[in-house]
């Protein structure tokens, strides 16, 4: 290894994660800010390292389906994936400005679900787990802000139809199965117009979760 | 549909005839003596199980090690690998070392039923009884996992197992490895590993009719269903460089990609350098690695010149930072492109897919945090990718044939795994 490092320096390839992860930056941006081109590549910067690590493992083990992601991480070790997750968890690129305003009705429906949930339908408030300011909580609950409307809606849909899975108990799949399409639309629209700064995820254990979760 | 059905019935008839003939000629029932387990070395067995890469096929994505259930998609249907943990009900718990030997050596299950040759018994038949016993001892020592085997989903007539006797009559020769006294012991060790446990021909030989494999013919082939091209294993390269590549996934001039990354991660990186070098010495004696001649270009001189000009521009903008302006790469970080057989083969599918999808070489003990290659599927057009692949296949003295945007379009959306 020492001989190798010597060679690397001779050729001046930076011995950094940023250099190693050019493959990730191609879609998720240099600092994990995400990219909106023909397809949408979500922001991964600043999400809790535990959440990002779980997703990388889920892609490697085919619990989440995305041929591009399944292949990119296919042959990488847990240790490396943990480093990658930590790297992006520490990035803090600026957020894009909020998107187009939905109608006040949609906004109200989204806000109600977000902050109060719907007890008769056993839907907890989003804020119960993701925090009042939707920053998420360490180690593995992601913040929800700074994502594109269609991406949020697509993830909810993927949970509903089993395309996106997590370790059991798969709490988000359970919640998504109780949502109607109108709920998802309202939630995604409300989330996408929230102004965002750069809040850190809450410290681990600061929220008492309303249900059991195997890792989102 | 009608024609397909007739063909299937004809195939069935031929295979039944062959099967009957085979049983008349070679009735089964020979039973090698059972050896005492205590003599077998569990540690050696673990090493040999790695050398045979039992792990990759017998472990499902996200599943428990060796508990089976991984789908193996073939042109004839889907097979699901079996549970080879020592669980009494669902695994090999009730198997004797003789049962295990029969599976490896003869391709037969404990109950005598014939195994599909996706299980490479046509290669494992070369494994010595001592080595088989050690592998058995290791597999008996691991934690049992209770997981029922999933039934195969093969199409008619391939779901008729007795017909495999016909396949065996045509394509399977049982027999332990015989050392060639004219060669060195290193060469013989390499041959034993490559042709036996390594079952390299499973990918690196062009498959014949009904998925048959000719062991001696490791001149490269398109891997069925995966559509990666496994290159010729003959090589001009120095054995030490080949061994380094097999051990770490990267070497002074190259980096692993596609299915080979899995083989290195799960099997080869765990082998001793001396064994990898022996494999390399054997491979070097098997020809110079020239694949099928690069197919003649159907482009006019002017079209080709246009492609090369566009390709040079894309290369400068997107590739040269890492692979270097002269295609020399950076040893053990970014593979060399000048003179790299991996991108010069007659079938350009690998180079196209690498540009489309990017990827990482495997994490190995010697290279735990590999440098990655970005995907370009979303930023370059089919034409630009055809141009840049044409360029790297034609620049710096490389002599690969040009690539068309139709070939690039065909490689988009091919399943990666």
Image: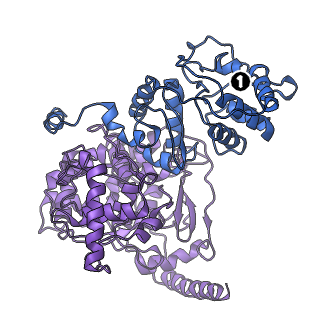
Chain colours: A blue, B purple
Q: Quadrant of residue B230?
A: bottom left
Q: Residue at x 71, y 18 (%)?
A: A128
| Of B217 and A35, the residue lying toward us | A35
| Of B33 and B93, the residue lying toward us | B93
| Of A183 and B254, the residue lying toward us | A183
Where B383 falls versus B217 (above or below)? above
Circle 1 residue: A126
**Mark 1, secondary structure of its residue:** helix
Left or right of residue A23: residue B339: left
Left or right of residue B415: residue A16: left
Q: Quadrant of residue A86?
A: top left
Where A62 falls versus A203 (above or below)? below
Left or right of residue A201: residue B346: left
| Of B393 and B183, the residue lying toward us | B393
Percent coordinates x, y for residue B221 in the rendering: 35, 70
Q: Residue at x 63, y 28 (%)?
A: A214
Percent coordinates x, y for residue B329 in the rendering: 20, 49
Percent coordinates x, y for residue B408 in the rendering: 42, 65
The N terminus of chain A lies in quadrant: top left
Q: Residue reaching furthest right?
A: A120
Percent coordinates x, y for residue A81 in the rendering: 43, 33
Q: Residue at x 52, y 26 (%)?
A: A47
The C terminus of chain A lies in quadrant: top right
Where A54 falls versus A74 (above or below)? above
Residue A180 makes an appearance in the image: no
Residue B235 makes an appearance in the image: yes
Disc 1 is attached to a residue of which chain?
Answer: A
Give the crowd class for mark 1: few <14, some 14-19, many >=20 residues within 10 Å.
many
Where B315 falls versus A62 (above or below)? below
């Amino acid at each position: 290894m020492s001989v190798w490092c010597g060679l690397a320096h001779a050729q001046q390839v930076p011995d950094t994660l940023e250099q190693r992860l050019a493959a990730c930056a191609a879609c998720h941006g240099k600092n994990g800010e995400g990219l909106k081109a023909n397809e949408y590549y979500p922001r991964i910067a600043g999400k809790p390292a535990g959440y990002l690590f779980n997703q990388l493992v889920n892609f490697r083990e085919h619990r989440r389906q995305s041929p591009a992601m399944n292949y990119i991480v296919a042959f990488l070790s847990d240790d490396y994936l943990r480093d990658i997750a930590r790297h992006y968890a520490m990035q803090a690129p600026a957020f894009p400005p909020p998107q187009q305003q939905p109608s006040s009705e949609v906004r109200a429906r989204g806000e109600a679900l977000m902050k109060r949930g719907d007890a008769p339908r056993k839907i907890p408030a989003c804020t119960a787990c993701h925090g009042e300011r939707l920053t998420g909580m360490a180690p593995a609950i992601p913040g929800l802000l700074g994502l594109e409307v269609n991406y949020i809606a697509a993830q909810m849909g993927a949970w509903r139809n089993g395309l996106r899975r997590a370790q059991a108990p798969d709490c988000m799949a359970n919640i998504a199965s109780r949502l109607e399409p109108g709920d998802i639309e309202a939630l995604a629209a409300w989330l996408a117009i929230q102004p965002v700064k750069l809040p850190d995820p809450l410290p681990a254990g600061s929220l008492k979760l309303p249900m059991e979760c195997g890792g989102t | 549909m009608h024609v397909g059905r007739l063909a299937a019935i004809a195939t069935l008839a031929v295979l039944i005839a062959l099967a009957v003939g085979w049983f008349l000629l070679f009735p089964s029932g020979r039973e090698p003596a059972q050896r005492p387990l205590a003599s077998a070395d569990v540690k050696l067995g673990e090493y040999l199980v790695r050398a045979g890469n039992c792990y990759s096929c017998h472990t499902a994505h996200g599943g428990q090690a060796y508990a089976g259930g991984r789908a193996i998609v073939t042109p004839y249907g889907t097979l699901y690998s079996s549970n080879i943990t020592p669980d009494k009900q669902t695994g090999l718990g009730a198997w004797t070392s003789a049962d295990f030997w029969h599976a490896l050596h003869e391709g037969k299950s404990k109950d005598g039923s014939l195994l599909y040759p996706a299980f490479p018994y046509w290669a494992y038949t070369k494994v010595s009884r001592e080595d088989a016993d050690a592998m058995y001892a290791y597999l008996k020592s691991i934690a049992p996992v209770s997981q029922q085997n999933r039934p195969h989903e093969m199409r008619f007539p391939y779901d008729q197992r007795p017909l495999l006797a016909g396949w065996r009559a045509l394509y399977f020769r049982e027999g332990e490895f015989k050392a060639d006294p004219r060669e060195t012991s290193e060469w013989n060790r390499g041959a034993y590993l490559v042709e036996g446990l390594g079952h390299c021909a499973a990918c690196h030989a062009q498959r014949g009719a009904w998925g048959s494999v000719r062991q001696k013919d490791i001149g490269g082939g398109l891997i069925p269903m995966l559509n990666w091209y496994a290159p010729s294993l003959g090589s001009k390269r120095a054995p030490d460089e080949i061994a380094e590549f097999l051990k770490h996934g990267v070497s002074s001039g190259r980096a692993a990609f596609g299915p080979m990354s899995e083989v290195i991660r799960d099997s080869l990186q765990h082998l001793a350098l001396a064994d990898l070098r022996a494999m390399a010495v054997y491979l070097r004696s098997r020809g110079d690695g020239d694949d099928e001649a690069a197919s003649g270009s159907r482009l006019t001189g002017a079209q080709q010149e246009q492609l090369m000009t566009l390709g040079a521009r894309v290369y400068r903008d997107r590739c040269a930072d890492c692979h270097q302006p002269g295609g020399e790469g950076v040893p053990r970080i970014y593979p060399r492109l000048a003179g790299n057989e991996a991108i010069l083969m007659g079938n350009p599918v690998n180079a196209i897919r690498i540009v489309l999808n990017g990827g990482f070489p495997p994490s190995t003990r010697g290279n735990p945090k590999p440098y990655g290659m970005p995907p370009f599927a979303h930023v370059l057009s089919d034409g630009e990718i055809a141009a840049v692949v044409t360029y790297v296949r034609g620049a710096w003295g490389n002599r690969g044939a040009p690539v068309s945007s139709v070939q690039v379009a065909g490689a988009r959306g091919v399943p990666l795994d």
